[in-house]
Image (cartoon, rainbow, N blue to C red):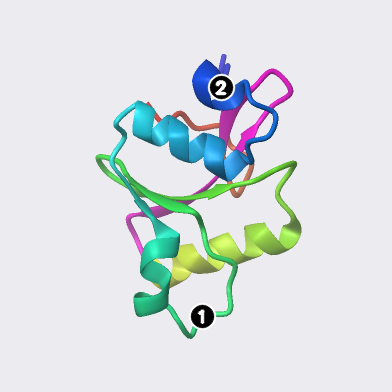
Amino acid sequence: MHKGVRDDDALARPDLSARKALQRYLRKQAIPHVDANKVKAGLFSQERLRLFDFVVHREATSWLLAACDGGPSNALVSDLREWERILGPGFLAVVAGVDDEGAIKFRTTEGEKVDIE
């Protein structure tokens, strides 16, 4: 059973957005990642799609990780799927959200649960 990932230091604070909570979690767990906002201007400045928040490097596939407060909108899911198409094989769009108990949940754009660890 997928229980989500809980990081009490990062998620117990209700003032944190899902993006900030996720960023703190990635840093605390020393999970290799790139903040996509830092690279978009140079690489994808002409794209009109909503940007994912982080690229998390996994063994076989890099995750295009979007933090989402609440459930992902159809527009976000559509944009993430387009990013998968643009970047090609080896990239998987994943939405991360914080549940009511403060756990981070990871799901593909098809709604499949995935684990970051």
**Residue drawn 64% across the image and 25% down it:** 13
Give above or below for 59 relative to 48: above
Give above or below for 65 relative to 41: above
Q: Is residue 67 magenta?
A: no
Mark 2 and mark 1 in contact? Answer it, CB < 8 Å. Answer: no
**Residue drawn 58% across the image and 79% down it:** 48
Depth check: 7 or 99 in front? Answer: 7
Q: Position of residue 112 (x, y in %)?
A: 58, 37
For the C terminus, the quadrant is top left
**Residue 3 makes an appearance in the image:** yes
Q: Position of residue 1 (x, y in %)?
A: 57, 14
**Residue drawn 36% across the image and 34% down it:** 27
Magenta part of the chain: 88-106
- Left/right placement of residue 12 relative to residue 38 reads right
Give above or below for 3 relative to 85: above
| Residue found farthest to the bottom | 46
| Residue found farthest to the left | 59
Q: Is residue 101 magenta?
A: yes
Q: Which residue is mark 1?
A: 47
- Image disc number at residue 4: 2
Q: Residues within 10 Å of mark 1 (few under 14, many from 20)?
A: few
Q: Amino acid at mark 2?
A: Gly
Q: Which secondary structure lies at badge 2? A: loop
Q: Amino acid at mark 1?
A: Glu
Q: Position of residue 11 (x, y in %)?
A: 59, 25
Task: State how far apart marks 2 and 1 are (Cα).
Answer: 32 Å
Q: Earlier in the sequence, mark 2 or mark 1?
A: 2
